[in-house]
Amino acid sequence: MAEGRLQGVVSSGSDIDRVYVSSVTVAPHGLSCSTNNNRPCGGLRDAYPCKHITALVAEADLQYGTEQVARFLRLDMTQVSMGTALTFLIKGHHQPTPAATVFSSFLHHLAYLELPQTTAPLPELHWFPATGAVR
């Protein structure tokens, strides 16, 4: 959840070497899904999410919780509280987004997996200063 959209990289279900960069903007829900080299997803049609966007929303639901994702996307909270799946509430429109920015960020974060294990803080991920820590 960043830059006014829920965004991420989703593995292809049919080709292990292919990934899709998928996103849903905050209301009015612009939907975008393409390969990392900007080839459009064949499953994204009109106002309904493709399987990659559905997987993205489901993973966000697991990681952040239904209410937080629903509020971020500005979905109808009364329908969310009745247990309606988030992807059924997303009735957007196709709004292509350049995949390069999201994919570049993904690759940057993926590089952290290749670092040797350590308990020392990484300066790049050290967002909060040590001064004024809780006593």
Image (spheres, grey):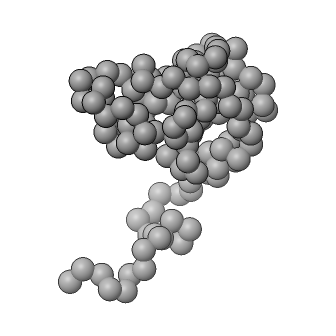
Q: Is residue 70 left or right of residue 35?
A: left
Residue appearing at x 78%, y 31% in the figure: 38
Q: Is residue 67 left or right of residue 116?
A: left
Q: Is residue 73 left or right of residue 52?
A: left
Among the 4 quarters of the image, the one containing residue 35 = top right
Residue appearing at x 55%, y 48% in the figure: 4
Asked whether residue 64 appears in the rendered view, the answer is: no
Among the 4 quarters of the image, the one containing residue 20 = top right
Q: Nearer the viewer, residue 56 or 77?
A: 77
Picture coordinates of residue 31 (x, y %)?
61, 29
Q: Quadrant of the C terminus?
A: bottom left
Report how many numbered discs are placed on residues in the image.
Answer: 0
Determine the residue located farthest toward the left in the rendered image: 135
Picture coordinates of residue 111 (x, y %)?
62, 51
Asked whether residue 49 appears in the rendered view, the answer is: yes
Q: Nearer the viewer, residue 17 or 97?
A: 97
Residue appearing at x 35%, y 22% in the figure: 85
Q: Is residue 43 above or below residue 118?
A: above
Residue appearing at x 45%, y 39% in the figure: 73
Picture coordinates of residue 23 (x, y %)?
59, 35
Picture coordinates of residue 102 (x, y %)?
65, 44
